[in-house]
Amino acid sequence: MKKQTEDVAEKCAAFGYIGNSFKKFINNYFKDCQKLISKVENKEFKKKNLEEIVEFYNSNCH
C-alpha cells in the first residue's frame, strides 16, 4: 500500500491479518486522518472497501 505522500509502497499485511485486526490496522496506518478513522468506526467503510479507503485518504487527508 502506498499513500500519495510516500515514495515507496509499504507492505501492510496479509488479508488474514487485516481481517482479524482491521480497525487496529486502520487506526495505526491512517492515524493522521480522523475523518477516515471515524468512517471505519461508523461502519461506512469495511475491510472489503480497502481500495476506497486508500482513495478517500489520498483525496481527503494530507
Image (tube, grey):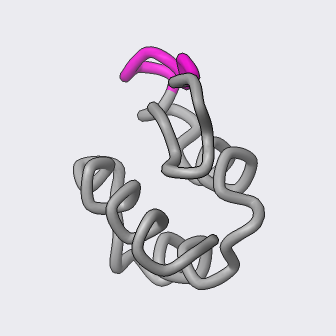
Q: Nearer the viewer, residue 20 or 1?
A: 1
Looking at the image, residue 27 lies above or below residue 57: above
Residue 53: where, in percent of width, then height?
Answer: 37, 60
Quadrant in which the N terminus appears: top left
Q: Is residue 8 magenta?
A: no
What range is drawn magenta here? 10-17
Residue 7: where, in percent of width, then height?
Answer: 59, 31
* Residue shown at the point (26%, 50%) measured from the top left: 51
Looking at the image, residue 51 lies above or below residue 11: below
* Residue shown at the point (61%, 39%) measured from the top left: 6
Residue 24: where, in percent of width, then height?
Answer: 68, 47
Q: Nearer the viewer, residue 29 or 39?
A: 29
In the picture, measured across the screen, residue 52 lies left or right of residue 57, that is left
Quadrant in which residue 31 is drawn: bottom right
> Magenta region, mostly helix, strand or loop?
loop
Quadrant in which residue 8 is drawn: top right
* Residue shown at the point (52%, 19%) measured from the top left: 13
